Amino acid sequence: MKLLEDKILKEGKVLEGDILKVDGFLNHRLDVALIADLGADIAREFAESGANLILTVEASGISLAFAAGEKMSLPVLVAKKHRSLNISEGVYAAPVFSFTHKTENTVVVSKEYLSAADKVLIVDDFLASGNAAMGLLSLVEQAGAKAVGFVAAIEKMHQGGRALIEAKGVKVYSLACIKEMHPGDIKFN
Amino acid sequence: MKLLEDKILKEGKVLEGDILKVDGFLNHRLDVALIADLGADIAREFAESGANLILTVEASGISLAFAAGEKMSLPVLVAKKHRSLNISEGVYAAPVFSFTHKTENTVVVSKEYLSAADKVLIVDDFLASGNAAMGLLSLVEQAGAKAVGFVAAIEKMHQGGRALIEAKGVKVYSLACIKEMHPGDIKFN
């Protein structure tokens, strides 16, 4: 999506450790108009998906998921992140390793809000190694629900997450797909 | 605001420890249409405030702040929550005690995105003892910026947070103002 690619080229910064800093518009300071446009693009792409629920994970997936939910008239389920696996009975839980923070968290949703009848569109800010995606997909599987797609604002293709998700038969859609990046140089697919 | 009060009466649950559970529409599963309406109400109330930035804190303030940002055409700055006070030079930081989780966190924003020129509308999901509000106000003060208002979706009046904010000359606006609550019984102001 050209709008997002242009923004990344203009304001994104590639840092040491394969980190793309986009906190001026996507993560920390939110460019609300831009994110609303990204939500509209997701709604167009998944108009025929039959999704009845959007699933994201706190904190940086929330704004994009909310924007998509507005355009698709769908509720958004926000998976909580916990430090420990000390989890109550009323939830589905899955481990997720954070590439950025080098920590393992657990993602959790209440069983009350995810059921076998749900068709779930998963939305997150980044797709890299696919750890967060696999954790969220695990929650959907545990509920017996169906994932109709996985959306990332930004995909870092060289980290291989896409293949893991597609191997489960789930469509992957990225709004900006980075083939290669180095300080001062970002190449899109 | 009657729309939110009715929703709280219908779906909210008062738990032991003075906790109001609203995770079916505000915190965990997001009722996107409802939250968009709350955002529109905030935009009406603060149309003449001169705000040029909305400030919230991850994670459960983000959706309401985003909805208000959309209606007011303003960017949203999301304060990050850290466990420790191990903070870098490039940020403003303030301690916040969480009433719900009984833990002390630090809220942090990058100096890059908050400056003395800013007129800031603070938006959060709850106002109770005012700890989160005071932390966010401290960030605004550290930057030399001006807070033009504090908005909570739900205020628990009996916990006294409002007085702390108003003592700083900042207007408080709550979308639902709870005077008293007990299991099975919620009274609005």
Image (cartoon, coloured by chain):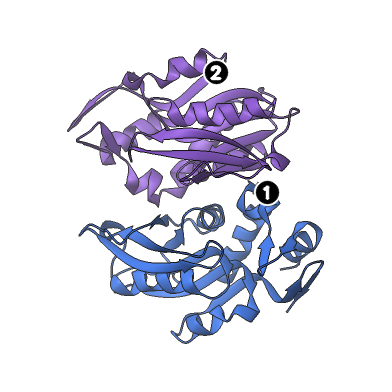
Chain colours: A purple, B blue
Is B4 rendered above or below residue A139? below
Amino acid of disc 2: Lys
Percent across and percent down for residue B36 are: 63, 53
Percent across and percent down for residue B182 are: 76, 72
Question: What is the secondary structure assignment of the residue under circle 2?
Answer: loop
- Residue at the spot of label 1: B31
Residue B174 quadrant: bottom right
The residue marked by circle 2 belongs to what chain? A
Q: Say which residue appears at 40% left-offset and 73% top-offset.
A: B137
Percent across and percent down for residue A105 are: 45, 40
Is B158 rendered above or below residue B93? below
Quarter of the picture holding the N terminus of chain A? top left
Percent across and percent down for residue A62 are: 52, 44
Amino acid of disc 1: Asp
Q: Say which residue appears at 41% left-offset and 64% top-offset.
A: B52
The residue marked by circle 1 belongs to what chain? B
Quarter of the picture holding the C terminus of chain A? top left
